[in-house]
Image: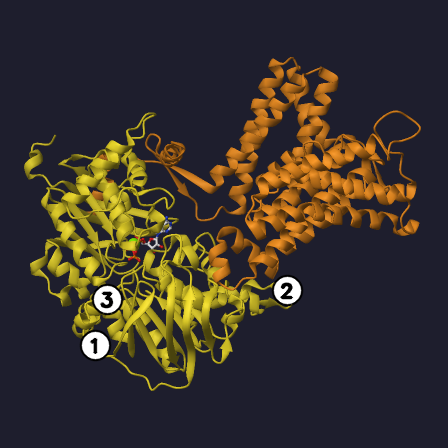
Chain colours: A yellow, B orange
Amino acid sequence: MGTAGPQTAPLLALSGVSRSFDGVRVLDRAAFDLKRGEIHALLGENGAGKSTLMNIVTGVYAPEGGRYLIDGAPAGIRGPKDALKAGIGMVHQHFRLVDRFTVAENVLLASGQLGLFANAGEAARAAMEAGKAVGLAVDPAAIVGELSVAERQRVEILKVLALGARIVILDEPTAVLTDQEAGALLLAIRKIAAQGRAVVMITHKLREVAGHSDRVTIMRAGRTVISGAPVGTLSAGDLGRLMMGEETSPAEAAEAGVIEAAAPITIAKPGEERLIVSALYAGGGQGSVGVSDVGFTLKAGEILGVAGVGGNGQQALAEAIVGLLPVAGGHLTLDGWELGEFSVARRRDLGLRVVPSDRFASALIGELSVADNLALTRVRTGRYRSRLGSWLVGRRRMKREAEQAIEAFAIAGATPARRARLLSGGNAQKLLLARELEESGSGVKLLVAHSPTRGLDVKACAFVHAAIRKAVAGGAACLLISEDVEEVRALASRILVMSAGRMVGELPAGASASQIGALILGQA
Amino acid sequence: MAKLDRVRMAGFLAALPLIGGMTLQRRQAAGPGLAMLSFLGGLAVGIFIGAVTLVAAGVPADDLLDELVVQVFLTSDGLAQTVVLATPLLLAGLSSAVASRIRFWNIGIEGQLWMGAIAAAGVALFHIGPEPLRLPLMMLAACIAGACWIALPLLLKLRLGVSEIVLTLMLSNVAYLIMQHLLFGAWQDPSGSFPISPRFDDAATLPGLGWGDVHAGILIALIAGLALWVLMERTRAGFHANAIGLNPVAARAAGIPVAATVVLFVLLSGALSGLAGGVIVAGTEHRLTQFIGINMTFSGIVIAFLARFNALATIVAALAIAGIYNAGGTLKVFYSVSDGVVVLVEGAVLMCVLIGQFFSAYRIEFARRPATVEDAEGEAA
Ligand SMILES: Nc1ncnc2c1ncn2[C@@H]1O[C@H](COP(=O)(O)OP(=O)(O)OP(=O)(O)O)[C@@H](O)[C@H]1O
Ligand SMILES: [Mg+2]
C-alpha cells in the first residue's frame, strides 16, 4: 500500500496507457481516474477508443505501457480474472447473456461461484437483493430470451453487482432505452454510486452528462483530451468542441450539443402510397410480442415514426415487412405488390431496405470483411459479376465500392479487407447504413429503420438523419421505429405509438414529447 | 439440475482463456505465410513427438527419417503409394469441407461412400451402358448415390430441424449393412467364399498412369479440388455459402437464397463422398469389398479442418495425411510396431498440426506486469 493510503488515493488511476492493433494506434497515452461514489462520464466520437480503454481497465486487453493503479498501488491486472477479483465489472455495448438461461442462472454464471456444488439459489438471491436495493428488480426465474431490452440490461447490471464490484462500467447503457427507461436507469446508477462504488458511464447523449454525472473524461482519436474535469466547468458547446476537435466552429459544436432538440422538423410533401399495411397479424408467442391488427399507410416522401417502449411488437412489425416473419393475417402491399408470399430477395428488388435493431445479430456478419458486408445484399443481383462469367464474383469492383462507402460514410477504422467485428460500435452501424442507403439513395423505395442511430455519436447521428431525409426527399418512404422519442420527433412527419402489438394512437409532427410519452404509458 | 450443469459448463468455457496472465487475441487475418508457417511448425513438433514414441517402441532411430519422410514422399514408389492413398482421402476431405462451409456437419461420409461404391459396382457388374461410357456412368452413379444418401438428412433438417449429425451417422450404419447384405448374398463372387464381389471388367476399371499403382482417380480428385476451389472462393454461390455459414440470420435478411445454397452444397458433399467410393472400387480394388472406406469420415473431417475448409489446402492436407498413413503401414509390417502405437503417432502429428493452426488464428498475450511498465511515461513527459 502506498503512503497516500486508501482514503485519499483514487480508486483507480491509469496514465500513459497506449494500445495498438496491427500497427494502428488506437489508444495514445490515455489517462483516466476514478473516485469512490462518483459517476464518471466517458465521452468521445465513434472509434475514439472508449471501449478499448475500458477493455484495458477490465484486463481484456493488455496495455502497451503506462501505469495502472488501484487504491494507489500497482493493480497487477494480467487478465479479466484479475480485474474481476479487483472488483471491476463491465456491462458491454453488445449484451453477453445466455438467452436460454434464467435470470438467476445468468447471474450465477457471472458470479464466479461455480464450484462443483455451487449454491445457485443463494447466489442468485443475493444478487436480486442487491438489485432491489438500487431499484433494479427482475424476476429471477424469467428466461432471459423473453425479457425486454431494458430488463436484459438490468440482468447485465445485476451480474456485475453480484460480483461485488466496486467499479461498475456501463458502455452506452441508455442507447437502447426509451426516455422513461433511461431515467429509471440513471436513478439506479446514482444509487449504485451512492453505495460507495464508482460508476463509469460511456455515452453519446450529452444531456445525460450534465444532469447525471460528476466528472467527465473526453477522448479524441485515442487521446484523453480532458481527464476527469468536474461536469459544472464545461458547457454543452465545450463538450462538443472537445470531442470533435479544435477545427470545429463554435456554432457547429453548440448545435451538436443540443442537436436532438434543435433538429428541424421537415414535412415532405407526400406522394403516392408506398406501403399499405392493413389488419396485419404476425409473430407473437413464446414470450415475444407480435403484431395484432395493425394498419397504416405510408406515402412516398413521408417518414412515419413508430414510438413505444422496446419489445412491444416493433421487432415483429419490422420482420413481417422485411419478409423474415410470415404474415399470419391481413395484408402488406408495397407499390401495389402484395408482399405476402414474396421472398426477402423479391422485396429487396422492389426497393425495400432495412436497418434492424440488432446489427450483428441480423444484418452484419462480424467475421466477414467490410467489403463483403457491403456486398452481402448485392452479390445476388449480379452487380459484381466478373468478366469471365456472370456466376463469378469480381472482387475489384467490390473493393472499389467499399473504399467509396468508407469515405462517404466516414467509417473510422475500416479498410475493405478488415473484419467488421473489429469496428467500433458506431462505425459498424455506419457500415450497415452505407449498405442499406447506398450513396445516392437511389433505388431505395421503402426504408425500414429500427433505431438507426443507436450507438452513434452526435455528428454521425446528424449524418444519418440527413441521409434518411435525403432518401425520402428522393421519393423513398421511411418507417422509423425508435425507442428514442426525440429521434422520432426530429424526423417523423406522422407519429404512431405502439403498445402490446397494437397501434394505440397517432399524432401529427410537432407533437410534444410529453404527449407521446402519455400515449406510450397508456394515459391518453 | 441438468440446466445447472450447462451453467457450469458454460462457466468453465468462459474461464478457459483466462488462465494465468494470458489472454487470447484473435488475429486480424492470418496471412498465407503465417498459416503455412504454423502448419509446418505443428508438423515438425508432431513428427518429433511421433519419432520419440517410435524409438521407444523399438524402431531404430537411424531408420526414422527414412521411413517417415524419404519413403513416403521422396522416393518414386513411396510417393506413388502416398498418392494412391491420398486419392479417396482428398475426395472425402473435399466432401467434409464443402458441407462444413455452411456448417452442415456431415458425419456420414462413410455411408455416402459405400452407397457410391455400391452404385458404381452395380453399373460395372451388370454391364450397364456401352463399354466406352462404362466408367463415366459408374462415376455418375456413385455421385448420385452419395447425394441421395445425404438428401434424407438434408430434407429432415430443412423441413423439421432434425440434427444432421445423428442422422448422417446412423445412415452410415445402414449403408454398411446394405453392402454386407450384397457381399454375403447376391453380389458375392461365386468362385470363392469370401465376401467380395466378382472382379470388374477392364472397361470398368480406372486406367493406371504408369506410375506405381497410381490411377486416373487422382486426376478426378484433383479436378474436383480445383473446381470446388473456384466454386467456394470465386462464385456467387460460394460467397453466399460463406455468409450462411457465418451468420444464417443475417444471410437470410440480406436476401441470400439460403435454402438453395444449402441444398447445393450439401448434395455436393454427398456426391463427393459417393465419388470417393466409386474411385476406390474402380481404381484400387476393382471389385466391391467390405473394407473400403473404413475411417474415411474421421480422415475426411480431419483433412477439411486442417485445410480450414479451403479446397486447395485440402489437396495438401490430404497428401500429408496419406503420407502419415503410408508410413504407418510400413512401420506395422516391417518393424512389428503395434497398431496402437501407429495410431498414437498419427494422432500426435494431427493434434500438433491442429494446435499449430490455432496459433495462426490466435495470438497469446502475456500481460506484462503493469507496475514495471513505465516506459511510456517517459515518452509522454
Ligand atoms: N481488437 C481490435 N482489433 C483491431 N482494431 C480494433 C480492435 N478493437 C478496436 N479496434 C479499433 O479501435 C478503434 C477504437 O475502437 P473502440 O471500440 O474503442 O471505439 P469507441 O470509442 O468505443 O467507439 P463507439 O462509440 O463507436 O463504440 C476503432 O477504430 C476500432 O476499429
Ligand atoms: Mg464502443
- Residue B322, horizontal then vertical, whole percent: 69, 33
Nearer-N-terminus badge (3/1): 1
**Would you name the residue on which mark 2 appears?**
A391
Nearer the observer, A268 or A3 = A268
Which dot marks residue A520?
A: 3
Q: Secondary structure at mark 1?
A: loop
Callout 2: chain: A
Disc 3 sits on a residue from what chain?
A
Picture quadrant where residue B117 is located: top right
Q: Are marks 1 and 2 in contact (CB under 8 Å)?
A: no
Q: Is residue A6 visible?
A: yes
- Whether discs 1 and 2 lie on one chain: the answer is yes
- Please, what secondary structure does the residue beneath circle 2 have? strand
- On what subunit does the disc labeled 1 rest? A
For label 3, the SS is helix
Q: Nearer the viewer, mark 3 or mark 2?
A: 3
Q: Amino acid at mark 3?
A: Ile
On residue A511, the disc is 1
Give the mark nearer the N terminus: 3 vs 2.
2
Considering depth in this image, is B338 or B248 the residue closer to the camera? B248
Camera-side residue of B318 and A361: A361
Callout 1 amino acid: Ala
Q: Amino acid at mark 2?
A: Trp
Relative to B190, is B28 above or below?
Answer: below
